[in-house]
Amino acid sequence: MHLHETVFLQKPRIDSRSEDGLRPEQFIGNIEFEGVDFIYESRPELKVLDQVSLKTEVGKTIALVGPSGSGKSTICHLLLRLYDCTAGRVTVDGHDIRDVNVKWLRQQIGVVSQEPVLFDGSISDNIRLGREGATQADIEEAAKMANAHNFIRRFREKYNTLVGQHGTQMSGGQKQRIAIARALISNPRILLLDEATSALDSESEAVVRDALEKACKGRTTIVVAHRLSTVRKADVIHCLSQGRLIESGSHDELMAREGLYYNLVTNQTEVDLHPC
Ligand SMILES: Nc1ncnc2c1ncn2[C@@H]1O[C@H](COP(=O)(O)OP(=O)(O)O)[C@@H](O)[C@H]1O
Ligand SMILES: [Mg+2]
């Protein structure tokens, strides 16, 4: 292959600082995946997503379940436009996300993932990262929503307590609640929870799960979880296997079908579902 062909075939990278694209004034938070295929350029032989179609409605929670490697996180990454799909399209409120301003899009989505990333700085600084210019009152309000205000108040330095490497030792559950406060402070229309409680012990999990259940109210939520107990209440559960959507429905519907979901639930040991 000639050099100019290589350049021609390479897709432009997504520029997160671009000022281009739509910034819809009214944003409701409807998401739709239409016949989405995805292949990583570094692994052309593997179709990571194969004709995935799904949609969410405002105020509703959808769950993605399936074995490790089935493509759940990839769906989250496409919605955040860390990558663009290979075929099909992803829309928000009917706009193809490739036509929407990337920064704007990401501002509408609160993300909580498995490992909370906190930097060396105060609790306030870490929460403020979710919205430039947030006031102390905004920060405390977000912390309250995330069930974090009470434990923060008990630290001697309160919101000025340092976290991260050189700061106070906090439990995984406390760090995760700070991450949730950071995700909520921009009042995002969409909440993306990718294994948000997976690394926690069951006691921390309960309090974080409670915070997340409050946080979902009035937002479009996508929750990825391998502990199936956390997805039971979702309005629609989508089961993936090897990048394909195998079945969708409520917990009761899917249990009655006795298919993949039923098998995941009845065979569940954490090890089966999440070998890594
Ligand atoms: N950056 C990457 N480059 C190449 N392959 C990847 C990359 N990230 C994930 N994959 C592959 O894509 C598939 C789906 O991964 P992922 O969406 O992370 O699954 P899940 O979240 O369901 O565990 C897996 O086979 C995984 O190995
Ligand atoms: Mg994942």
Image: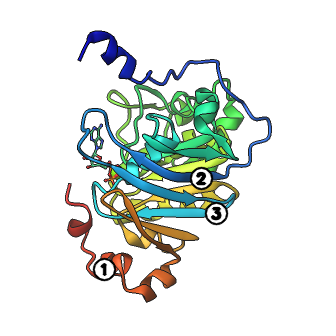
Residue 95 on image: x %, y %: 67, 41
- Do labels 3 and 2 touch, CB within 8 Å? no
Look at the numbered discs 2 and 1 and tell me whether their residues touch, using CB distance below 8 Å.
no
Q: In this rendering, is residue 249 above or below 18?
A: below
Whether residue 165 is visible here, answered yes or no, is yes
Q: Which mark is residue 60?
A: 3
Q: Secondary structure at mark 1?
A: helix
Alpha carbon separation for disc pair 1 and 3: 25 Å
Say the numbered circle drawn on residue 32: 2
Marking on residue 263: 1
Q: Nearer the viewer, mark 2 or mark 1?
A: 2
Snapshot quadrant of residue 255:
bottom left
| Mark 2 or 1, nearer chain start | 2
Instruction: Name the image quarter holding residue 5.
Output: top left
Q: Secondary structure at mark 2?
A: strand
Could you classify mark 3 by the number of other residues whose Cα lies within 10 Å: few (under 14), some (14-19), or many (20 or more)? some
Which residue is pictured at 61% across the width and 35% down the height? 105
Label 3 or label 2, whichever lies nearer to me, is 2
Quadrant (top left, top right, bottom left, bottom right) of the N terminus: top left
First along the sequence among labels 3 and 2: 2
> Is residue 244 rendered to the left or right of residue 273?
right
